Image (cartoon, rainbow, N blue to C red):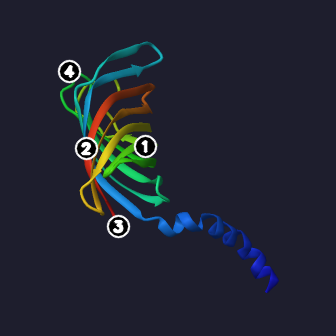
Amino acid sequence: MLHRLALAAPALAVLLLAGPAAAESTFVGGVEGMLGFPGSFDFDTDIDTREGDTDTSFGLVPWVEKKLGDVVGFGGEMMFVWMKPEGAKERRLVLSPHLRARMAFPIIDKVTFDAFLSGGLTMWTPVDDSNGGTDDFRLGWSMRFGFGGSYAINEAVSAYGHLGWYTTTSYGDDVTANMHTVPLCVGLRGNF
């Protein structure tokens, strides 16, 4: 019996330390639309570097997180972003599953300040375009952050918006490709 208590002691300590936060934590989920202002790209090879601007990007980002206490939440998101270098024939779908951390605290009445940071894997789907060896499926990493605010429509649902930065880097075919944009995102989130 003592060995069972010894095994349970670390779990009991975590529960005691996180008790107030765990009792109040809920799940929060949302979906946001993204408009990425024209940004920049660079394709680096062993021979040279090609740089330029990107066209306007579009995206959709569903996400869910576990809220810990009143201020911080941790979770995941899946970014679906359509972007392309300026002058390219078609937009490329960039898929970015991310881990995310968000901080939100009240400013006045129903208005809160929000800030988040997310990052993870990125997958560039193939395109039928000539981008100097970057047309095939590509893997890499991506990251984004943003600052903004939200307004509580009722106790369960809030409308929010934020401005931030998104970068995606992929590797393959002896080319390192990067695309960056400054996205404006608006969406709805709810507690469940």
Query: Residue lying furthest top in this view?
Result: 48
Q: In the rendering, which numbered label is found on residue 47?
A: none
3D distance between C-alphas at marks 2 and 4: 27 Å
Query: Residue lying furthest front in this view?
Result: 109
Identify the residue position indicated by label 2 in the image.
186
Label 3 sits on a secondary structure element that is: loop
Sequence-first tag of 1 and 3:
1
Q: In what quadrant of the picture does the N terminus appear?
A: bottom right
Q: Amino acid at mark 4?
A: Gly
Pick the front one: 16 or 86:
16
Q: Is residue 46 above or below residue 187?
A: above
Please tell me whether mark 2 or mark 4 is closer to you in this view: 2
x then y, percent, for residue 152 = 28, 54
x then y, percent, for residue 149 = 33, 43
3D distance between C-alphas at marks 3 and 4: 44 Å
Label 4 sits on a secondary structure element that is: loop
Sequence-first tag of 4 and 1:
4
Which corner quadrant of the image does residue 179 belong to?
top left
Identify the residue position indicated by label 3 in the image.
192
Q: Amino acid at mark 2?
A: Val
Does the rendering let one see residue 139? Answer: no
In the image: residue 121, left or right of residue 35: right
Please tell me whether mark 4 or mark 1 is closer to you in this view: 1
Pick the front one: 2 or 141:
2
